[in-house]
Each structure stands twice: as C-alpha cells, then as structure tokens.
Image (cartoon, grey):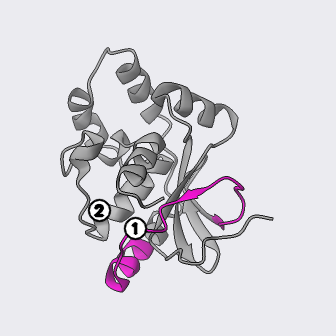
C-alpha cells in the first residue's frame, strides 16, 4: 500500500514516472526517469496539471512518487504555494508546450528563443505548475542548478529537472 512520508508538508512537490503517451514523450525528450510532477496541498491531496486541465487528486493515486519532503518550507511559504496551486486548478493543459519541447530536443530552437512565446502562454504542464507554485511562494531556489535564470518561463522546467534539482539539494 502506498503511504505518504510522515514529514511531507503542504507546498512540497513530487515527481513520478508518469504514464501514457505524454509521460513517455516527456521521459524520452528529457532522458529522465521522471515524467510527471505534482504539488502536495495537504489532507492527502495534490494538484496536478494533466489533460485537459489542472485538477485536485489523491496524493496516493501514484505509487512511485519521489517526494521532495526534505525541502525547507516555512508555514507562510506553504500557504502561498497552496493558494497558487488552488488558483491554477481548472487551467487548461499546455499542449503547445510539447511543440516547444520538440523544437528544443531537435535543437531547432533554444529555451531563450522560445521564452517570448511561453511568456504569452498562461497554460501549464505538470512541472510548470509546480515551478509556478514554488516561485509564487518565493522559495529561494538556485535555479542555475537547473540551467535556468530566475524569472525564466516555468514551461521550460521538466519533471526531470525537478528530480535532478531535488536530488542535488538532498530533498528526496
């Protein structure tokens, strides 16, 4: 039976292998085990961006989540992350982001070149939803470890990047 880490706090996130064609595409494109990302909002629930729109789901729906449960987060930051996650529930899933993923993987465009298009895009893929909530909560991430600059578009963050960051920071 799947259980949550005893020290898991609202506002912390997790990554899972993901399933279906979308998870497979993400894993292949990013060469990572992680294909999906979620944010924990407390009471055994997560918010996840999944087609067709971001939704609240049970935190136990995935049996392979690797939680960033050692990530430092204050009660104020927890409240901000949870508020942002709730605000994103119902937002459309960002299918066009996969075009951007493909352009980057094929080395036809860089993240810097794609950034203006993504800035005009208010939709979210799963890892972008997590990144958005973390930035809204003003968590002091050193995003250079993900090869991103502060303020870069959240849709450029993949589940694999979150997994790598959480591992480097020893939060997993």
**Number of the label disc, if any, that sits on residue 85:** none
Q: Residues within 10 Å of mark 2 (few under 14, many from 20)?
A: some
Q: Are marks 1 and 2 in contact (CB under 8 Å)?
A: no
Asked if residue 67 is among those painted magenta in the image, a careful observer would answer: yes
Residue 124 visible within the image: no
State the image coordinates of residue 96 (x, y, percent, origin top left): 45, 33
Q: How many marks?
A: 2
State the image coordinates of residue 91 (x, y, percent, origin top left): 49, 56
Q: What span is colored magenta in the figure?
A: 57-83
Q: Residue at x 49, y 26 (%)?
A: 29
When the figure is inspected, residue 37 is found, relative to residue 56, above or below; the finding is: above
State the image coordinates of residue 123 (x, y, percent, origin top left): 42, 48
Image quadrant in which the N terminus is located: bottom right
Q: Residue at x 33, y 77 (%)?
A: 77
Q: Which residue occupies the foreground of this view, 88 or 127?
A: 127
Please, which residue is most extreme toward the right here? 1
When the figure is inspected, residue 58 is found, relative to residue 152, above or below; the finding is: below
Q: Is residue 101 left or right of residue 42?
A: left
The quadrant in which residue 169 appears is bottom left
Where disc 1 sits, the SS reads loop
Q: Earlier in the sequence, mark 1 or mark 2?
A: 1
**Number of the label disc, if any, that sits on residue 71:** 1
The quadrant in which residue 21 appears is top right
The quadrant in which residue 152 appears is top left
How far apart in space, not on screen, are marks 1 and 2 (Cα)?
Answer: 14 Å
Where disc 2 sits, the SS reads helix
Q: Residues within 10 Å of mark 1 (few under 14, many from 20)?
A: some
Q: Residue at x 65, y 66 (%)?
A: 59
Residue under pointer 2 = 135
């Amino acid at each position: 039976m799947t259980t949550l880490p005893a020290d898991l706090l609202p506002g912390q996130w997790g990554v899972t292998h993901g399933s279906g064609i979308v998870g497979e595409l993400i894993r292949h494109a990013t060469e990572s085990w992680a294909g999906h990302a979620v944010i924990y909002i407390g009471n055994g629930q997560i918010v996840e961006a999944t087609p067709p729109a971001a939704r609240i789901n049970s935190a136990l729906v995935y049996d392979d989540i690797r939680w960033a449960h050692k990530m430092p987060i204050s009660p104020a930051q927890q409240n901000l992350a949870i508020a942002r996650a709730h605000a994103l529930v119902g937002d459309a899933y960002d299918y066009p982001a996969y075009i951007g993923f493909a352009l980057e993987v094929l080395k036809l465009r860089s993240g810097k070149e794609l950034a203006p298009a993504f800035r005009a895009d208010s939709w979210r893929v799963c890892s972008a939803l997590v990144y958005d909530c973390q930035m809204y909560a003003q968590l002091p991430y050193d995003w250079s470890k993900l090869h991103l600059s502060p303020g870069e578009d959240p849709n450029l963050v993949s589940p694999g990047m979150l997994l790598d960051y959480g591992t480097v920071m020893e939060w997993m």
